[in-house]
Amino acid sequence: MKKLLGWIGKGVAAAVGVVLLYQLWIFAHVLWWIDHNPGSTAFMAAGLARQQEKNPDAELRRQWVAYERISIHLKRAIVAAEDAKFIDHDGFDVEGIQKAVEKNLKKGRLVAGGSTISQQLAKNLFLSGERSFIRKGQEAVITLMIETTWSKRRILEVYLNVIEWGNGIYGAEAAARRYYRSSATNLSRDQAAQLAAMVPNPRWYEHHRDSRTYQRRVALIKRHMGSARVPR
């Protein structure tokens, strides 16, 4: 019995060690990306694999653009659409989380996350798109790492450069060129609202921007863009 308990103890210790090493690996990346731009993300890798199943030669479209070269309209549109309290919170919108928990309990499963831009970025950089309580827990840990070490400006800069805007389209510059043959710098107020409205389901909206749901979302974002506060 003692021998069995000893093996169990060693197994638990080994598992804890692996988890801690993984957290250190993530934290090392978070620190590196304070002033180095991510070359890829977990979501990009998954998107490329998905595309290459149909076309082995498929490539992602993306081009990094500095924060100051991204249209102020897009910054405001994204904050208005995704996280109105972005400037003020420490990574988590408590009210939004409470509403999400109530919705999840009502449905009996994870259907809503109440995620902030910081949480979405944490998931995008390191995790999969699956919904589970374990993944949400890891997302929270990474969010704390990012919020503790990055400025709000850096968080929004990276977010705008890595999020998906259609099949194989990642970041504001690639999105601006794909949909408007423009640059992220020159996006107008209307174009910014249209791009922000795509974020929840970019691969679907890429081909359904005439849907009523999308058009209503665009109109709502435009109404709130003027009051959206973004980092300078």
Image (cartoon, grey):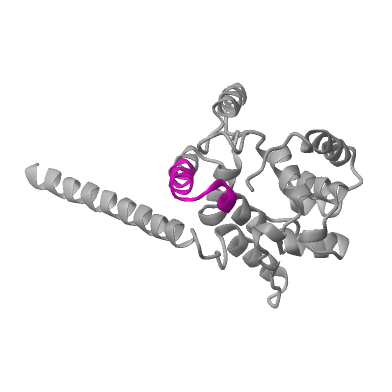
Question: In percent of the image, x 56 and y 68: which residue is there?
Answer: 39
Specify start and end residues of the magenta stretch as a single range.
138-155
Q: Is residue 147 left or right of residue 95?
A: left
Q: Is 151 a magenta residue?
A: yes
- Residue 221, image x and y in percent? 80, 37
The answer to which quarter of the image holds residue 224 is top right
- Quadrant that contains the N terminus: top left
Q: Compare residues 8 and 180 and report the one nearer the observer.
A: 180
Outermost residue toward the front?
232
Give the residue furthest to the right: 210
Kindly identify the residue that appears in the image at 66 percent across and 66 percent down: 64
Task: Kindly identify the residue that appears in the image at 79 percent across and 50 percent down.
Answer: 195
Query: In this orientation, which residue lies closer to the viewer: 81 or 46?
Result: 81
128 left or right, relative to 174: left
Q: Is residue 166 above or below residue 4?
A: below
Classified by dominant secondary structure, the portion drawn in magenta counts as helix
Going by the image, does 227 lie left or right of 110? right
Quick one: 5 or 20, which is closer to the camera?
A: 20
Q: Is residue 182 visible to the viewer in this orientation of the structure?
A: yes
- The spot of residue 86 in percent (x, y) is 61, 38
Answer above or below: position of 55 versus 191: below
In magenta segment, residue 71? no
Q: Residue 151 appears at what percent x and percent y? A: 52, 49
